[in-house]
Image (cartoon, rainbow, N blue to C red):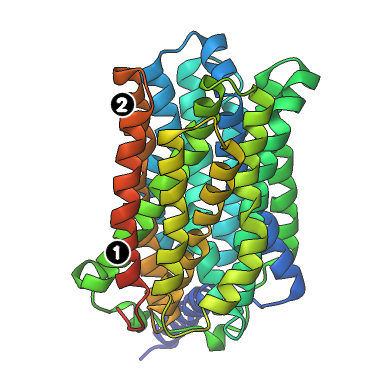
Amino acid sequence: MSIAEHETRTEGTIATTTAERVDRSRRAALIGTPLLVVGVALAATNLRPAVTSMASVLGEVRDDLGASTAWTSVLTAVPTICFGLAAIAAPWLGRRLGMARAVGLALAVLTAGLLLRIVDGPWVVLGGTFVAAAGIAVGNVLIPVVVKESFPGAVGRVTGIYTAALAAGGGIGAALTPPVEALLGGWRGAVGAWALLSAAALVVWACGARHGSAADAPSAASDERRSMLRRPLAWAVTAFFGLQACVAYVAMGWLSELFVSEGISRTDAGLMLAVINLIGIPLSFVIPPIALNRRSQSGWIVGLAACSLAAVVGLAVAPAAAPWLWTVLLGTGMGVFPLGLGVIALRTREASETTDLSAMAQGFGYLVGACGPFLFGMLHGFTGTWTASLVLLGAVIAVEMVLGWVAGRPRFV
């Protein structure tokens, strides 16, 4: 072998080794520091205001744009549709870019979408909402994986912080947008202002997200595993997650309009929507650390879903009789969400499986969930009342309870 050939082979080996080292560094878990917990919490805070801020001024947006009921129904369904479609690409982004860069990119896309949707008419609003929801979808899938990988001894506690931040973001978005709208003189400024929060989250995430040693990363060979699509329990978890998402996004998209149609002021209706989200804060600190440390989560899931079912019955029979009671019951029932995230981690043995199950559950699950707001709104438009829509929602919750029982049983996919 000539010296030139030897040098060429050596350079090729070095290049290959360097590429493998870079790839393994991207696979390494983020270092679980207190600053990363802050980054996770602040990122989570931004995963709901894009939805609830628009929902709280939905009537004004529709009237200002001269939009139809069908357009409004599509707008409420767009986030969940995008959550499903973009979630499928999230594992690839996580492997390609690494968790730090992938979540950072998600926050940047979210910020761009929040700004885009306030610059023009109905189609730009839909497009900007889709872009913002794409960023949210990637965060939805990857942040629970960060929690499992970076905080293996505190999954329940950090999941509680994450979901409490989600609830806080959703509640703040619903509560503050109407008064900010009055202050700024229109819905565009009030809705677009949430881009400031997502930009701040991006800065904190960039400071706090650091990958660990490449030596600790799993090898590429670990990617060769049986598809989640061939595992029955994975489908049960996915269906359960999709139905709870359906209930949550119907509530966030339409509850405010339902109360307004019953004579409740827009401000009070916005506060009720905020309460539904804010109830999740104390529940997220209490329920996940307890329930996720038990062998089975089935009883917790069924009990919480039963609260949602009671709220829907109340809304169907006497919506204006006790609106705050229905609000509290529905908010309590939506406390099932952190358990939906928790069972994704608990039903898997390793982080790679968690990533795949998270993508499947949130990808297909949110596509199922997207049907809820759309059908709920269309049924209301066809019938002129809320009764048929609420009956459909009650049936969804009943099936959710059955599938939640299956998903919560102590076994692995």
Asked if labels 2 and 1 touch by Cβ distance under 8 angstroms, the answer is: no
Q: Position of residue 36 (x, y in %)?
A: 70, 69
Residue 363 visible to an observer of this rendering = no
Q: Is residue 272 above or below residue 13?
A: above
Instruction: Answer with mark 1 or mark 2, whichever residue precedes in sequence.
Output: 2
Q: Position of residue 412 (x, y in %)?
A: 32, 82
Q: Position of residue 394 (x, y in %)?
A: 34, 45
Q: Mark 1 is on which residue type?
A: Leu
In the image, taking residue 323 as reference, residue 138 lies left or right, namely left
Of helix, strand and loop, which one carries label 2?
A: helix
Q: Is residue 356 above or below residue 373?
A: below
**Where is mark 2, residue-wise?**
379
Q: Is residue 391 above or below residue 182?
A: below
| Quadrant of the rendered image containing residue 391 | top left
What number is the disc on residue 403? 1
The residue at 43%/85% (across/down) is: 295
- Please tell me how many numbered marks the rendered image carries: 2
Q: CA distance from mark 1 to mark 2?
A: 25 Å
Q: Nearer the viewer, residue 100 or 126?
A: 126
Q: Position of residue 18 (x, y in %)?
A: 52, 78
CA neighbours of label 1 inside 10 A, class few (<14), some (14 to 19), many (20+): many
| Quadrant of the rendered image containing residue 256 | top right
Quadrant of the snapshot with the N terminus: bottom left
The residue at 50%/75% (across/down) is: 27
The residue at 52%/39% (across/down) is: 252
In the image, taking residue 398 as reference, residue 174 lies left or right, namely right
What number is the disc on residue 294? none
Of helix, strand and loop, which one carries label 1?
A: helix
Q: Residue furthest bottom?
A: 1
The residue at 62%/52% (across/down) is: 167
Q: Is residue 59 above or below residue 371?
A: above
CA neighbours of label 2 inside 10 A, class few (<14), some (14 to 19), many (20+): some
